[in-house]
Amino acid sequence: MEVDLLAYEKDLYKKGYKLIAGTDEAGRGPLVGPVVASAVILPINYQLEGLNDSKQLSEKKREKFYDILMHDAISIGVGIVDNKEIDKINILEASRKAMNIAINNLNIKPDYILTDAMKLDRDVPVLPIIHGDALSLSIAAASVIAKVTRDRIMVELDKEYPQYEFAKHKGYPTKKHLELMKKYGIIDKYRMSYKPVKDIIEGSRIHEKV
């Protein structure tokens, strides 16, 4: 059965809400770089065929939808929380903070917020939806903006540190990435609180002592 990605939005339109922001984040799993969130307010009953959770889309499709959404959306906000802050407050709180920044960066205040399973303390109603990026068009739109924004940050980081191949794996702990980390060491863009990073730092210390 096909999911109506506007079901949540339509229900809220009926209740009188007009400016519904969907919000989602990208980059919880990577070992390096920031977590990026986006908040998107779409026009009422907006349709964009093929738009879905960014994880289900190819990079080419995400880039295409990114451009369309940047043109069509009523408002888009982005929030970025860097690796040092992630280490300080943990990835869940960093994701929450990025979402709040993204919402604050909207140029129009939403009257309702849909999140991908994230509880937020706001002065307007918030509905966390489990697997929201696959059930709400507004959240799916935010997931695409967040993912493309973060991927572009990793491509820029790749130019600075080409030996780590960040443009290919985007900081996720692939086998190749872990090999490159062991070979070239840990730069200050890494999330030092993440176990694979800690293990490599610890391993190099033991190696130095021997």
Image (cartoon, rainbow, N blue to C red):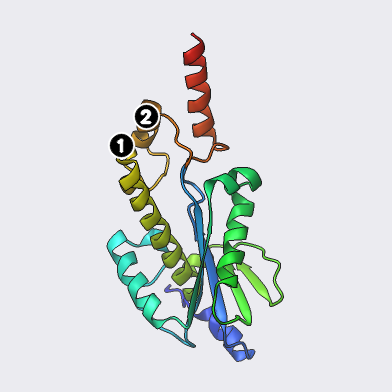
The residue indicated by pointer 1 is 163
Which of the 4 image quadrants contains residue 172? top left
The residue indicated by pointer 2 is 184
Label whose residue precedes the other's in the sequence (2 or 1): 1
Q: Secondary structure at mark 1?
A: helix
| Lateral position of residue 152 relative to residue 128, left or right | left
From the viewer's perspective, is residue 48 above or below residue 80? Answer: below
C-beta proximity under 8 Å, tags 2 and 1: yes
Q: Residues within 10 Å of mark 1 (few under 14, many from 20)?
A: few
Query: Which residue extends farthest front?
Result: 160
Task: Identify the residue at horizontal 57%, vertical 60% (top origin).
Answer: 98
Q: Residues within 10 Å of mark 2 (few under 14, many from 20)?
A: few
Query: Which residue extends farthest left?
Result: 60
**Quadrant, the N terminus:** bottom left
Q: Secondary structure at mark 2?
A: helix
From the viewer's perspective, is residue 60 above or below residue 209? Answer: below
* Position in image of residue 178 (x %, y %): 39, 33
Which of the 4 image quadrants contains residue 104? bottom right
Judging depth in this view, the residue of 4 and 182 nearest the camera is 182
What whole-number distance in Å separates the C-alpha atoms at marks 2 and 1? 8 Å
* Position in image of residue 151 (x %, y %): 38, 55
